[in-house]
């Protein structure tokens, strides 16, 4: 039997990895991918805890999370494309127009 | 019914103010004069009903405001005193309105209407002042006439001196008004009411105050208001400058009505003032001093209106002297006769100025007797009246005052006041006839030096033809040209003649008992207005005529005393008549027979002459002692220091602070996405750590 | 050793290694592939948790739709290489790297520490608890209790669609 904690620890590790990815990568697309990792980690937590409590709510939440992730990925990638058209680069350091 | 009396002129004001611009002059004038005459008619009927029923009329229009214990209705009261006043105001006011239709004829339609709207408004406020049954209502009128005085003095506001004169009048009046308000408040706090009747009733149970008590301070403050409004020392300085306004304005406001408001106020509060002997002594002293001072200044002035202005100040001094010795009826009597002849003199001078196309300097006049007969004869009547020659009006009122001063028991220095009063009477006759001789007799002269900025005493009023500028007044009078002199047009002549008749006969209502057993109607008429409600005075409380801290005189004893004094009174009458004649004689010698003698005297006493010509430099003293320090304080300390430095700095400082702090904070916006992400997560870590730690 | 335990460890390992690969890979193309692998491992974990519906939707939506989208974009932009850091981040450069690494490690430590203090918790093993995750039950709950959220999500997707179209449109 796998205790709940194991799933939660795993999800924490995945979340940390995703966070590291957001910081360490200098490619917009990879940053978005890291965000997807983080979302997935959270999904895992929900499903695990939902199973622990014996309700179906966990999975329903993950259903919504997935939907939102899809929408966000779509819009995010559209933005990336638009940005790429402006600067011909995918590095986040190139977009400093909001600087004071 | 009473409310109609001030309402009619107010309606005239509304009409002329709002639609007057589009009305032709004849309609504006008709409206303005019509409402005044109508008000006069109603005043006559109301006064008649008061006299015949021996009962005053009270009317409360509505409750103005209530605050705690203070309940102030808009209440009007017509008793003997105020009926006399409204007759004077509406009667002489109507005459002056009629006169003005001709005098102001060269103005444009809109200016004409504006003039009459202000004049009507003034009449309305003055009527409210005298009809008011309580201090606040009187104060409404008080302030209102001050406002109208400002508007009318500065009627030709495009001329700087006129605008300045209007401001000066208003500001000096304001100082007096401040005293009035404080006095009014003190009266309320001490006596619990502001209604005149109730105040008189409340105070009659007090004994006379011996020291500087509440009543003395309150009445002194009220008197301060009176000095402002009625041009006594120390607040008289606005009146001579007020001659910048049109001459009918000077006649109405600064001779017959507004300046008498202070005298009326004291008369209204006779009972209150009687209980503050110190105040009465101050009033008498200031009145006398003002009379003398103004008389000396008037003696050397070269502008015809200035002489009359100082004469007004001087005669007002007489009225206050009368009030100060407790002769309230005599003071009001002189107010009434003075209204006639002073208005006459002013209107006459207006006719002269009108005929001479704006010339006002006496040194440029002369020989007008043959060209302006009506003006001359009416003016002469007015001059004789003011000089105090019997049997014209001025003699009776002035003599009554002098007699009452002589025979008064209080103040202790009343004899000195009497002597000064006599001296002033001499001066009055002298300067008045100096004016008559210089203006009307002899040959036409042009002795005044040409106008230049260093001119010692500026010519007031309507601009002289030599003045440069596009002033409306200038063009309006210069249109006459200097070549032809014509006497007063019918409207003006009518007013002059009626006033002359009044100057002759107005005094006869006060024919004293001593002189051929006359019945002093006016004293009896006014007497009961000065008593507190419920009739007679209590023994020990000051009676009208002799506020004595000492013994009370019973009625019978009063009769006996009166008999014994008749011969004294006759003797005093003789003295004052003789002085009047002497004054006329002096004037005849110096200004008719031997003009050079006058100039020799002037150059021999040149220092004194200059002092008088410059009005004892009072204006300059005030300017240096009061105006400049205030201006320096305002500019240096209050403006630059507190306002610009303090408040602006505080407000701007907030802006500067925000700007400074934001210029530091904006450096967080590095524009680098990763930096933002980093700061986000930093926050998350901290928060998470905080919760885990707990 | 239970099958489920072994499966758990295998799937967990795959997921973690794949995620590290996603983050560490140079080429975005490889990152996408590795992420698909990670999703697959996660789907396996869902099945272990008696959540077949979630597993299937994970594969269909995530791996099948979202990742394909990512792949499209990667290929469209030809973003096969990654540029070195420049600009402000360059000045943070190595230090920036370190801050990021430190932060993520910190987060990981926090989470793990927190969770380990919870103590072991065991799933209930009765069949009722397991069968609650049937598709019928999920559908029932979704369309009744969470009907509003469901509808709102549909609008969200519509908005995202429109937004994506507008944003990515070629400027003329």
Image: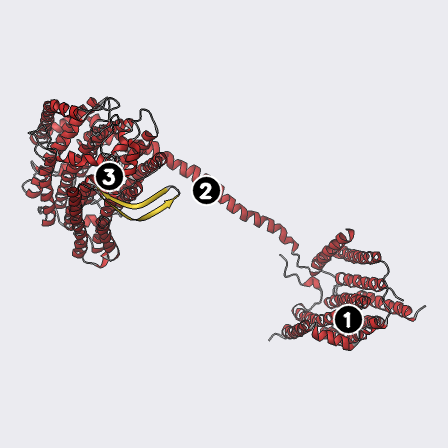
Q: Disc 2 sits on a residue from what chain?
A: B
Q: In this view of the protein, which residue sits in the foreground, B286 or B220?
A: B220
Q: State left or right for residue A58 relative to residue B170.
A: right
Residue B441 seen anywhere in this rendered image of the structure: yes
Element class at badge 1: loop
Callout 2 crowding tier (Cα within 10 Å): few <14, some 14–19, many ≥20: some
Look at mark 2 in the image and give the residue it sits on: B643
Question: In the rendered structure, are the residues bearing label 1 and label 2 in contact, judged by CB atoms less than 8 Å apart?
Answer: no
Q: Which mark is residue B261?
A: 3
Q: Could you say where residue B553 lies in the image, as x and y percent from the top left?
A: 20, 24
Quick check: B151 above or below B231?
below
Q: Could you say where residue B666 lies in the image, as x and y percent from the top left?
A: 62, 53
Real-space CA distance between mark 1 and mark 2, rounded to the nearest whole angstrom:
71 Å
Judged from this view, the residue extending furthest toward the left is: B370
Which one is closest to the eye, mark 1 or mark 3?
Answer: 1
Q: Are marks 1 and 2 on the same chain?
A: no
Element class at badge 2: helix
Question: In the rendered structure, are the residues bearing label 2 and label 3 in contact, judged by CB atoms less than 8 Å apart?
Answer: no
Look at mark 1 in the image and give the residue it sits on: A56
Element class at badge 3: helix
Q: State left or right for residue B75 relative to residue A62.
A: left
Q: Disc 3 sits on a residue from what chain?
A: B
Residue B307 seen anywhere in this rendered image of the structure: no
């Amino acid at each position: 039997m796998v205790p709940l904690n194991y799933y939660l620890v795993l999800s924490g590790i995945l979340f940390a990895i995703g966070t590291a990815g957001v910081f360490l990568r200098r490619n917009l697309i990879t940053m978005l991918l890291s965000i997807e990792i983080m979302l997935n980690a959270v999904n895992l937590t929900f499903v695990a805890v939902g199973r622990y409590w014996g309700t179906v709510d966990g999975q329903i939440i993950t259903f919504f999370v997935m939907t939102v992730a899809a929408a966000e990925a779509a819009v995010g990638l559209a933005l990336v494309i638009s940005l790429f058209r402006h600067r011909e680069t995918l590095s986040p350091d190139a977009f400093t127009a909001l600087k004071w | 019914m009473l409310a109609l009396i001030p309402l009619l002129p107010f309606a005239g004001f509304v009409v002329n103010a709002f639609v007057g611009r589009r009305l032709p002059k004849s309609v504006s004038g008709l409206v303005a004069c019509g409402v005044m005459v109508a008000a006069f008619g109603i005043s006559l009927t109301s006064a008649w009903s008061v006299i015949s029923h021996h009962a005053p009329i009270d009317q409360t229009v509505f409750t103005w405001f209530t605050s705690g214990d203070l309940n102030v209705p808009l209440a009007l009261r017509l008793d003997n005193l105020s009926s006399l006043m409204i007759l004077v105001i509406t009667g002489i006011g109507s005459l002056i309105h009629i006169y003005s239709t001709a005098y102001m004829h060269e103005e444009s339609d809109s200016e004409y209407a504006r003039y009459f709207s202000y004049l009507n408004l003034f009449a309305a406020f003055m009527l409210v002042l005298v009809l008011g049954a309580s201090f606040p209502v009187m104060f409404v009128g008080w302030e209102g006439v001050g406002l109208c005085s400002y508007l009318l003095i500065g009627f030709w506001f495009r001329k700087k001196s006129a605008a300045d004169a209007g401001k000066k009048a208003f500001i000096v009046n304001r100082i007096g008004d401040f005293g009035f308000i404080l006095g009014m408040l003190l009266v309320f706090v001490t006596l619990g009411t502001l209604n005149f009747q109730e105040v008189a009733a409340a105070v009659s149970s007090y004994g006379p105050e011996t020291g500087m008590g509440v009543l003395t301070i309150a009445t002194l403050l009220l008197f301060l208001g009176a000095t402002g409004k009625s041009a006594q020392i120390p607040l008289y300085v606005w009146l001579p400058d007020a001659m910048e306004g049109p001459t009918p304005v000077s006649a109405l406001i600064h001779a017959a009505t507004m300046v008498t408001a202070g005298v009326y106020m004291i008369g209204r509060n006779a009972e209150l003032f009687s209980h503050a002997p110190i105040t009465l002594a101050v009033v008498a002293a200031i009145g006398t001093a003002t009379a003398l001072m103004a008389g000396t200044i008037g003696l050397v002035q070269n502008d015809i209106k200035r002489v009359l202005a100082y004469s007004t100040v001087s005669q007002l001094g007489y009225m206050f002297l009368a009030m100060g010795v407790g002769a309230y009826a005599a003071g009001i009597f002189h107010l009434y006769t003075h209204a006639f002849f002073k208005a006459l003199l002013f209107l006459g001078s207006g006719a002269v100025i009108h005929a001479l196309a704006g010339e006002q300097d006496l040194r440029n006049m002369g020989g007008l007797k043959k060209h302006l007969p009506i003006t001359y004869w009416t003016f002469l009547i007015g001059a004789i009246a003011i000089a105090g020659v019997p049997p014209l009006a001025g003699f009776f009122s002035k003599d009554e005052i002098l007699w009452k001063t002589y025979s008064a028991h209080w103040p202790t220095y009343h004899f000195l006041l009497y002597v000064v009063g006599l001296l002033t009477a001499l001066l009055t006759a002298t300067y008045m006839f100096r004016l008559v001789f210089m203006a009307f007799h002899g040959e036409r002269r042009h002795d005044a030096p040409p106008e230049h900025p260093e001119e010692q005493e500026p010519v007031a009023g309507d601009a002289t033809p030599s003045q440069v500028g596009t002033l409306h007044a200038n063009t309006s009078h210069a249109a006459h040209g200097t070549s032809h002199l014509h006497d007063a047009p019918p409207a003006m002549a009518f007013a002059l003649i009626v006033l002359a008749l009044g100057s002759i006969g107005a005094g006869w209502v006060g024919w004293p008992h001593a002189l051929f057993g006359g019945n002093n109607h006016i004293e009896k008429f006014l007497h009961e207005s000065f008593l507190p409600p419920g009739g007679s005075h209590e023994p020990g409380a000051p009676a009208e005529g002799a506020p004595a801290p000492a013994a009370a005189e019973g009625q019978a004893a009063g009769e006996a005393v009166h008999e014994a004094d008749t011969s004294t009174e006759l003797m005093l009458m003789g003295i004052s008549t003789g002085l009047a004649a002497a004054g006329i004689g002096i004037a005849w010698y110096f200004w008719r027979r031997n003009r050079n003698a006058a100039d020799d005297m002037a150059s021999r006493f040149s220092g004194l002459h200059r002092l008088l010509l410059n009005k004892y430099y009072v204006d300059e003293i005030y300017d240096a002692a009061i105006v400049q320090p205030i201006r320096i304080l305002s500019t240096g300390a209050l403006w630059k220091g507190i306002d610009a430095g303090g408040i602006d700095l505080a407000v701007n400082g907030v802006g500067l602070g925000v700007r400074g702090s934001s210029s530091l904070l904006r450096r967080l916006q590095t524009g680098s996405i990763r930096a933002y992400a980093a700061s986000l997560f930093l926050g998350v870590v901290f928060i998470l750590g905080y919760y885990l730690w707990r | 050793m239970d099958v489920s335990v072994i499966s758990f460890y295998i799937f967990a390992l795959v997921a973690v290694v794949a995620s590290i690969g996603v983050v560490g890979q140079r080429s975005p193309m490889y990152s996408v592939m590795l992420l698909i692998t990670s999703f697959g491992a996660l789907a396996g974990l869902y099945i272990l948790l008696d959540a077949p519906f979630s597993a299937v939707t994970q594969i269909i939506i995530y791996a099948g739709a979202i990742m394909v989208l990512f792949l499209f974009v990667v290929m469209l932009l030809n973003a096969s290489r990654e540029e070195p850091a420049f600009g402000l981040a360059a000045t943070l450069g190595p230090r920036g790297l370190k801050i990021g690494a430190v932060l993520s490690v910190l987060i990981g430590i926090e989470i793990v520490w927190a969770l380990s203090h919870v103590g072991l918790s065991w799933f209930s093993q009765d069949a009722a608890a397991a069968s609650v995750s049937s598709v019928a039950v999920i559908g029932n709950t979704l369309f009744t209790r969470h009907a509003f959220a469901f509808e709102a999500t549909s609008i969200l997707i519509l908005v995202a669609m429109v937004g994506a179209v507008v944003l990515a449109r070629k400027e003329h």
